[in-house]
Image: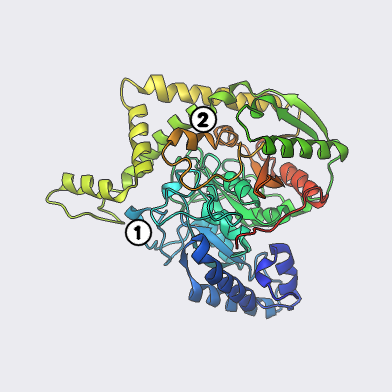
């Protein structure tokens, strides 16, 4: 076994742990040491839970030594986006307003991961309340891209992506409301899966836009994504939006087969202004898919051009309602004040950062009387048209392939002065959330600066097996030579 245990995938670590070639404590220590060595450069972690992680690892080693078969993720060290409530572990959502919030309960996905035997290394940086595409909106400083420290890791799950890319953890949890798993996965050269809306419970996750939010894994390989999905998905009596559909064994769907796969390529997603290297890498991958027996044909998603505008009305409207609970009374930060109104006012003025305030104002405006019909209701109607475009497309294809992001990782500060430019970095991911579909991002090449390029594979509702199978087959074909991050 190599001495760089932190580089292992879940799949390899699982095998080594079961054969007792390595222990969960050794693996956890290797990740904790890696975290100490790389964090001064990256700032991917907001909290490192060293002693809790080692306690969990010891328990995992006991289970591995027992006579019962060990659970699926026994002894696997994970990082958790700081939006998930973990009992007794500070959960800030990268906001001052939750700076000292320690949840008294676990999110359902955290309970599931505990039952699967996982080890939690700590909580990962993000854009405040998951609003952003670069992790620069964190109240605790930005995370940096492990391929180039002058660049962003994407967002909002930027800490989750950077930590996996830099081998600080074997995999991590993220959330995706408009692209927040897929876009950072693309910019950091890893795999990110956004499941179908309702596939994974959201109980115990700080809500941003409830009709869009989904939980998913960020992993080093597609197979690891399938392993994580199996642990995460499934019905939850505590989340009424969560589907009761049985959870397939995603790993057994990975049969390496690409023959007869019908790939739709939406012409609207190959736009002007896209970085040429991104266009080239995606087209080269399409050629490769065809060489392996898939058929690619052009399709149209005519309403996708309205996706960004539609999303920024619906997501902000829902956020303005969800964030009303941060009033300084029940939990989190409370400002000094003379009376109740001043308490609300000062708590929110001091507790929220500028992007969160911008979204609350936009959303409140879109919902206000006189504007509701013109903005919010209209956005809901366009959302239906976007969903119908996808439904029609999936009559003639099995998956849809697009770039994940129009560019590779941009420089820190490059888009912070221009929110619209920042919003446009999600142009290829947002329509998938509006339609509630599953999609993943996987690496498909590198630009001339050595920065990773992401390929997005979109499936029909509950088509996780299909997109994972296609992505795994592509990954296994070896057509994309993976490069390690050079800056860590
Ligand atoms: N970047 C998008 C936004 O700022 C998406 C964020 C997300 O998926 N959480 O809203």
Q: Position of residue 220 (x, y in %)?
A: 67, 57
Q: Residues within 10 Å of mark 1 (few under 14, many from 20)?
A: some
Q: Residues within 10 Å of mark 2 (few under 14, many from 20)?
A: many
Residue 96, compared with residue 358, is above or below; it is: below
Image quadrant where residue 69 sits: bottom right
In-front residue for pair 188/310: 188
SS assignment at label 1: loop
Q: Is residue 161 left or right of residue 285?
A: left
Instruction: Tell me which residue sits at (39%, 63%) in the image.
Output: 104
Decide if residue 264 is in sight here: yes
SS assignment at label 2: helix
What mark, if any, has residue 99 been given in the picture?
1
- CA distance separating discs 1 and 2: 31 Å
Q: Is residue 96 left or right of residue 183?
A: left
What mark, if any, has residue 307 been given in the picture?
none
Instruction: Tell me which residue sits at (58%, 46%) in the image.
Output: 409
Residue 156, compared with residue 16, is above or below; it is: above
Q: Which quadrant: the N terminus? A: bottom right
């Amino acid at each position: 076994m190599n001495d760089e245990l932190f580089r292992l995938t879940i799949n390899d670590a699982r095998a080594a742990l079961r054969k007792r070639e390595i222990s969960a404590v050794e693996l956890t220590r290797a990740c904790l040491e890696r975290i100490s060595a790389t964090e001064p450069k990256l700032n991917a972690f907001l909290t490192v839970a060293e002693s809790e992680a080692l306690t969990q690892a010891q328990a995992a080693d006991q289970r591995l030594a027992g006579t019962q078969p060990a659970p699926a993720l026994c002894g696997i060290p994970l990082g958790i986006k700081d939006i998930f409530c973990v009992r007794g572990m500070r959960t800030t959502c990268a906001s001052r307003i939750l700076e000292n919030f320690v949840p008294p309960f676990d999110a359902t996905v955290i309970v599931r991961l505990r039952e699967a035997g996982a080890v939690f290394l700590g909580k990962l940086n993000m854009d405040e309340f998951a609003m952003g595409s670069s992790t620069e909106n964190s109240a605790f400083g930005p995370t940096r891209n492990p391929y180039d420290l002058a660049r962003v890791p994407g967002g909002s799950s930027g800490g989750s992506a950077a930590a996996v890319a830099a081998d600080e953890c074997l995999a991590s949890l993220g959330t995706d409301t408009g692209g927040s798993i897929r876009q950072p996965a693309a910019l950091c050269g890893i795999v990110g899966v956004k499941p179908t809306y309702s596939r994974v419970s959201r109980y115990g996750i700080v809500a941003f836009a409830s009709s869009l939010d989904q939980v998913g894994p960020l992993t080093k390989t597609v197979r690891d994504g399938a392993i994580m999905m199996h642990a995460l998905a499934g019905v939850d009596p505590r989340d009424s939006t969560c589907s009761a559909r049985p959870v397939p064994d995603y790993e057994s769907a990975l049969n390496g087969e690409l023959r007869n796969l019908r790939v739709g390529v939406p012409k609207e997603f190959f736009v002007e202004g896209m970085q040429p290297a991104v266009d080239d890498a995606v087209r080269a991958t399409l050629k490769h898919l065809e060489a392996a027996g898939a058929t690619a044909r052009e399709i149209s998603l005519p309403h996708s051009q309205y996706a960004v505008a539609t999303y920024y009305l619906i997501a902000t409207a829902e956020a303005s309602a969800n964030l009303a609970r941060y009033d300084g009374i029940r939990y989190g930060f409370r400002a000094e004040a003379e009376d109740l109104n001043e308490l609300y006012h000062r708590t929110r003025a001091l507790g929220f950062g500028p992007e969160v305030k911008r979204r609350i104002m936009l959303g409140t405006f879109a919902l206000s009387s006189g504007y509701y019909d013109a903005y919010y209701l209209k956005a809901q109607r366009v959302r239906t048209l976007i969903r119908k475009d996808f439904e029609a497309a999936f009559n003639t294809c099995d998956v849809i392939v697009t770039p994940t992001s129009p560019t590779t990782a941009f420089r820190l500060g490059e888009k912070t002065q221009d929110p619209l430019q920042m919003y446009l970095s999600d142009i290829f991911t947002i329509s998938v959330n509006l339609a509630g579909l599953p999609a993943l991002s996987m690496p498909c090449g590198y630009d001339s600066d050595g920065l990773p390029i992401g390929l997005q594979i979109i499936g029909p509702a509950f088509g996780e097996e299909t997109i994972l199978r296609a992505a795994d087959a592509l990954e296994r074909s070896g057509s994309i030579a993976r490069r390690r991050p050079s800056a860590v």
